[in-house]
Image (cartoon, rainbow, N blue to C red):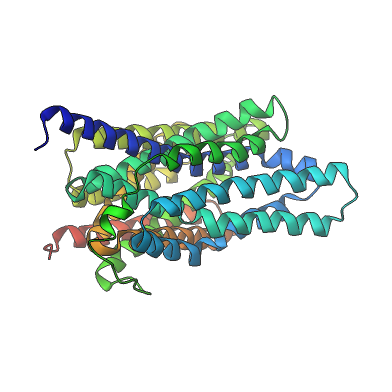
Amino acid sequence: MRTPLSKNQERKGVKASATVIASIAALMGLGQGGLLVSLPVLVSETQLSLTVWSIVIATGSVFFLPASPYWGRQSDLNGPKPIVLQALVGFGMSFGLLYVFIRFTNTSNLPDAWVIAGLVTARIVYGLTVAGMVPAAQHWAVLLKGEEKRLEAITTISAGMSTGRLLGPLLAIALLNIHPLAPLITLTMLPFIGLLIVKSLPDPGRQTHTQTKPSAPVLPPWRAVPFLFIAMLGSAALALMQYTLTPMLQVATEWSVSDISNAVGMLLTVSAAITLTTQILVIKRQRLSARRMLVAGAVLMLSGYTLFLSLHWPVLVLAVGLVAAGGALFVPAYVSEATSRTVAQQGTMAGYIAMSHTLGYGLSALLVMSLAFGVVIPIGINITLSGIILFVSVVLYLKPRQ
């Protein structure tokens, strides 16, 4: 029989392990933010155009489509720990290869075609390996905290990613003052430090795998499709908003290019801070069920996207804040609801959700071409997408749980 002291120690151990896993998930945000902030420097260092770099970076995202569900299934079959470990190795290798081939452009006469091939290879390594990090981390957190605390576990990982997105640009800016490639060096080293820490954590897969060996479905179950659908639409709307922040500010203000660039950075920082704050409050207070969070998040996002129509600078700040708060509620809610419908294949479902996010980002890249018809058009598209999300969320809220 366990004593109250041993139970307290167990709770502290679970909390510490969950914090470590959330910190590992934060690497995703650090990598994204660091790469985006470093992009002008990378263009300057390699003499490759911004278009080439955009294609190089996008290459990694493409490979998330097949890799996320695959690693999710492997997490169900073999436990999440080995998936997180290989994701960390792939993360470090990817940024290490980026550093090596960028250095080649300055220290050798290597043709641009070979440099580009090396950079693309680095991003392929990233896409094929790091795609498993978030699904496995979410799976691991749920195994640690238990089914009854599924929403708290998933929100913990989301908060970790939000922390990375908040700190990533700030860290990159500080490191760029030291050396142009310092962010890449840091992002190469951090995963291997994380690797040493994660290796010391107990493997939850060994405890669950012996009890049940889940089948690995090729396609998601129909009951989870609505959640995957709104995950795709939500990601598309958010990415489209980020793409159109600069054009909106150009219409709303008469600022210089540098002022607009700083304003976009400030808006993204505010967005990340509000997202993180909302998620922490949700974890601690736990006042809303997942279904209510789904509807509340959809309402906030629709309100925020509608406010963008004002094209007035102070209102844009409020709009970004509402969208961020809505997303902070919305994302953990649909992840929790979707994974609860496939208890034996939680990693697989988390992989499908990551795939839906990638599809959403791809959709936004197509929708951004609507800017050719004026900045109001993409705003209208986002209002439409968030309206569909709200409709589906209300239907799911009213539908009796089976």
Observer able to see residue 234: yes
**Residue 358 in picture, x, y percent from top left:** 48, 59
Q: Taking 348 as reference, is 283 left or right?
A: left
Q: Nearer the viewer, residue 18 or 299?
A: 18
**Residue 237 in picture, x, y percent from top left:** 44, 54
At horizontal 56% and vertical 42% (from top left) the residue drawn is: 31
At horizontal 55% and vertical 40% (from top left) the residue drawn is: 192
At horizontal 30% and vertical 72% (from top left) the residue drawn is: 215
The N terminus lies in quadrant: top left
Q: Nearer the viewer, residue 131 or 239?
A: 131
Q: Residue furthest left?
A: 1
Is residue 198 depicted above or below 83 in this figure?
Answer: above
Q: Taking 147 as reference, is 352 left or right?
A: right
**Residue 251 in picture, x, y percent from top left:** 57, 42
Q: Residue furthest right?
A: 109
**Residue 344 in picture, x, y percent from top left:** 25, 63
Q: Quadrant of residue 100?
A: top right
Q: Quadrant of residue 2?
A: top left
